[in-house]
Image (cartoon, rainbow, N blue to C red):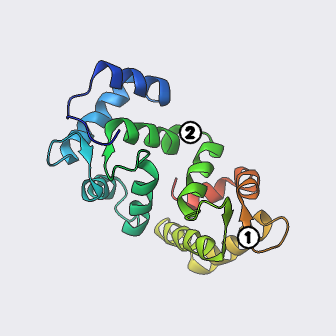
Amino acid sequence: MGQQNSKLTKSDIEFIGKNSNFSKEEVANIYGEFKKFDKDGNGSFDRKEFVLFFKSKLPNYPEDNLNKLFDAFDSDKSNTIDFKELTVALSIIGKGSAEDKLKVLFDIYDKDKSGILEKKEVDEMIALMKNVGVSLGKSPGDIELFIVKLFEKIDKDKNNLISREEFLTEGARSPSLLTLLGI
């Protein structure tokens, strides 16, 4: 998917319509923004263009996490993100259900694709949550306490590992989790 020319085709529009929750007007607006940040005009974002695009929308979002998003959005692993990949991903993050968002986040942090978030992976997610919480004006101590309690609640079997099922089930019950994860 990643490499294309910069013109949006009828089949692209049909694909986006079927796979996103965006109206035609929203697609047109996103496409205009996409073209502004596609500096080389090749119809796709490389990692740098992607980061610049999101930094313009989320200036306080950590660049490391934007790189993780890039990897997650690059569905064909071409090291580029075309407009179709971008709009489908933005649709999930912006307009998708809580479950859809949690699935994307789990997949981003489950680096070894084991279906389990291990301590190191959970720690990375917690670091993101702390950054987002502070950027929202929350006190670091309050955020820390909330996160500890939240992850204790999510880890139902108390094995210090979080399964996909645990994350999706308990995460859906906590709107604050999505907020602190920045989506």
Q: Position of residue 122 (x, y in %)?
A: 62, 71
As shown in the figure, which amino acid type bears the numbered disc 1? Answer: Leu
What residue is drawn where x is 49% and y is 42%?
Answer: 94
Q: Quadrant of the N terminus?
A: top left
**On the image, numbered disc 1 is attached to which residue?**
161
Please identify the residue farthest to the bottom as the structure is shown: 141
Q: Position of residue 48 (x, y in %)?
A: 25, 59
User: Is 119 located above or below residue 39 in the figure?
Assistant: below
Packing grade of label 1 (10 A; few <14, some 14-19, many >=20) is some
Q: Could you tell which of marks 1 and 2 lies nearer the N-terminus?
A: 2
Instruction: Locate residue 78 relative to residue 146 in the image: left or right.
Output: left
* Near-viewer residue (20 or 129): 20
Q: Position of residue 112 (x, y in %)?
A: 58, 65
**On the image, numbered disc 2 is attached to which residue?**
96
User: Is 20 located above or below residue 139 in the figure?
Assistant: above
What residue is drawn where x is 57% and y is 68%?
Answer: 125
User: Is 150 located above or below residue 139 in the figure?
Assistant: above
What residue is drawn where x is 50% and y is 66%?
Answer: 132
Residue 11 is drawn in which quadrant?
A: top left
Q: Which mark is residue 90?
A: none
Instruction: Locate residue 35 relative to residue 107 in the image: left or right.
Output: left
Report helix, strand or loop for mark 1.
Answer: loop
As shown in the figure, which amino acid type bears the numbered disc 2? Answer: Gly
- Number of residue marks: 2
